[in-house]
Image: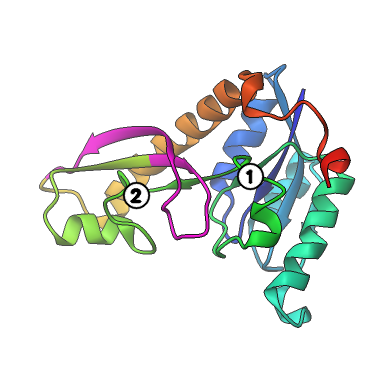
């Protein structure tokens, strides 16, 4: 069974969806919630679900490299196989990307490469797009630029507002993210057979 850590900076609704889905999976388990913000509501969700949560505040570190080095040590201690970003509002750096190459994924509320970065839902409405959707992708050095794993589209109706479109997108996210993770972890070729601790 693969061991998953979820990174979240805010509400954590995708974290909760994945964690609840994992209860019924024999392929993966959520062993850790990590956050960079002590006020993140995702931490409350983790407590309610009985999942360990850790908060490391970037302001307590001299630079990004030392910050991510401590995160990496945390992941190694928990023998994490896959890192899942779910509303984590920081770009991941080389200190984590190198040891977890092709094992960090993210979800984004648009059909990438359209509307990367923040405000994807607003931007889709503002330009009059006829559709948008959800993308799950591997994480690289850029912002929402990694290879795409899965996508699902939805039409943007004339009456849609930010709130109605966000609700539609979140319904897709809460289903598509657990489904995609399940499919990924069942494909053993995506994971090096030796453990992370043996490779570092």
In the displayed image of the protein, which residue is found farthest to the front?
199
Residue marked by disc 2: 166
Vertical placement of 93 versus 113: above or below? below
Q: Look at the image and give the residue range highlighted in magenta.
A: 135-157
Residue appearing at x 61%, y 19% in the figure = 187
Residue appearing at x 53%, y 49% in the figure = 139
Quadrant assignment, res 196:
top right
Element at badge 2?
A: helix
Residue 114: assigned label: none
Instruction: Bin the neighbour count of mark 1 within 10 Å (Cα to Cα): few under 14, some 14-19, many 20 and up.
Output: some
> Position of 70 compared to 120: left or right?
right
> Position of 182 compared to 155: left or right?
right
Residue 153: image x %, image y %?
27, 35
Residue marked by disc 1: 101
Q: Is residue 76 magenta?
A: no
Residue 164: image x %, image y %?
28, 48
Q: CA distance from mark 2 to mark 1?
A: 30 Å
Instruction: Bin the neighbour count of mark 2 within 10 Å (Cα to Cα): few under 14, some 14-19, many 20 and up.
Output: some
Residue 55 appears in the rendering = no
> Position of 90 compared to 124: left or right?
right
Q: Is residue 143 magenta?
A: yes
Residue 47: image x %, image y %?
77, 48
Quadrant assignment, res 73:
bottom right
Quadrant assignment, res 111:
top left
Earlier sequence position, callout 2 versus callout 1: 1
Nearest the eye: 50 or 133:
133
Residue appearing at x 78%, y 80% in the figure = 60
Vertical placement of 94 versus 189: above or below? below
Vertical placement of 86 versus 198: above or below? below
């Amino acid at each position: 069974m693969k061991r998953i850590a979820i990174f979240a900076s805010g509400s954590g609704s995708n974290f909760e969806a994945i964690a609840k889905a994992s209860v019924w999976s024999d392929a993966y388990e959520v062993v850790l919630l990590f956050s960079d913000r002590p006020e993140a509501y995702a931490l409350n969700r983790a407590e309610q679900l009985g999942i360990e949560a850790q908060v490391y505040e970037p302001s307590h570190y001299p630079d990004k490299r030392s910050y991510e080095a401590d995160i990496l040590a945390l992941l190694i201690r928990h023998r994490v196989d896959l890192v899942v970003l779910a509303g984590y509002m920081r770009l991941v750096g080389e200190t984590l990307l190198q040891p977890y190459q092709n094992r960090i994924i993210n979800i984004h509320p648009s059909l990438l490469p359209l509307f990367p970065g923040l405000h994807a839902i607003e931007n889709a409405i503002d330009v009059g797009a006829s559709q948008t959707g959800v993308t799950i992708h591997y994480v690289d050095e850029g912002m929402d630029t990694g290879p795409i794993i899965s996508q699902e589209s939805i039409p943007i109706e004339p009456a849609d507002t930010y709130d109605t479109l966000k609700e539609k997108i979140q319904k897709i996210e809460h289903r598509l993210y657990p489904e995609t993770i399940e499919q990924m972890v069942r494909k053993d070729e995506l994971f090096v057979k030796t453990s992370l601790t043996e490779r570092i």
